[in-house]
Amino acid sequence: MTDDSPTASVSSMPLRDLRLRPGMAVQTRRLVEGASKKESQFLAAIEGKGVMVGPVGPHGVSTELEEGEVCVVRGFTGQHEFSFVSKVLQTFEKPFAYALLQYPKKVDATLVRQSMRIKTSMPAELTILGDAGGMGPATGVTLIDISVAGAMVRSRASAGAVGERVRLAFSVDFEGAAVQLALAGTICHGHTVAAQEGCLIGLAFQGLSQHDRLVLHYITQTRPT
């Protein structure tokens, strides 16, 4: 999506501003020669006290970090790529495996998307909007990611040309109630993917109402990435 790719620049910011959520994927690597990256997950943070990271999955048994050593943590929030260097304060095996890291004063962060984008898989309908206000037939698609700026859908076949106006309709859960959205936008790109059925179509939303933006902001902030 065209407005999800700003010029990348690294900035220094507080960890709390990243709004990390429990279960978010990160990578940890000990700062010793020959150390490899470890797929991990963010568990929790107490500002000024520490950051908890653990192995991926319910059966993870080791963080592969040792008390007293220094490690680098990297991750992606859905908007920012970030990294910080920290000292391992303690490691634990019970009640589950995790490492307590020193809380960083700042993290290096690069804004790579203007809007938080989440992965999903839900049915939707894509309709081509004619120049004279007419509408073509609705095509069933699968919504595979979404942000306040746009979305990506998978269709069995190409649904339209780049630049064509469309309407994307789908239902979401908003605070326990089903909400029907019908969002206007344009096709930004479309391409087939090797070994996958159908076509991926990128959409950029246009003219969203305040209600639409509120709902989109809610689902992108409350669902896991």
Image: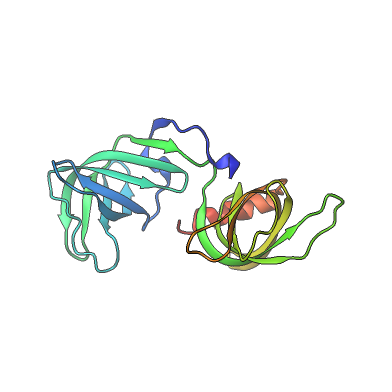
| Residue 22 left/right relative to 148 | left
- Identify which residue is drawn at 39% across, 37% down: 109
Q: Position of residue 163 (x, y in %)?
A: 70, 46
Name which quarter of the figure residue 125 lies in: bottom right
Residue 142 versus residue 164: which sits nearer the camera? Answer: 164
Name which quarter of the figure residue 152 lies in: bottom right
In the rendered image of this protein, does residue 132 appear above or below residue 33?
below
| Residue 74 left/right relative to 222 | left
In the rendered image of this protein, does residue 68 appear above or below residue 194?
above
- Location of the N terminus by quadrant is top right
Residue found at the far right of this picture? 132
Q: How many marks?
A: 0
Residue 154 versus residue 84: which sits nearer the camera? Answer: 154
- Identify which residue is drawn at 52% across, 35% down: 6
In the rendered image of this protein, does residue 5 appear above or below residue 204?
above
Q: Position of residue 171 (x, y in %)?
A: 64, 66
Q: Position of residue 191 (x, y in %)?
A: 58, 54
- Identify which residue is drawn at 28% across, 44% down: 73
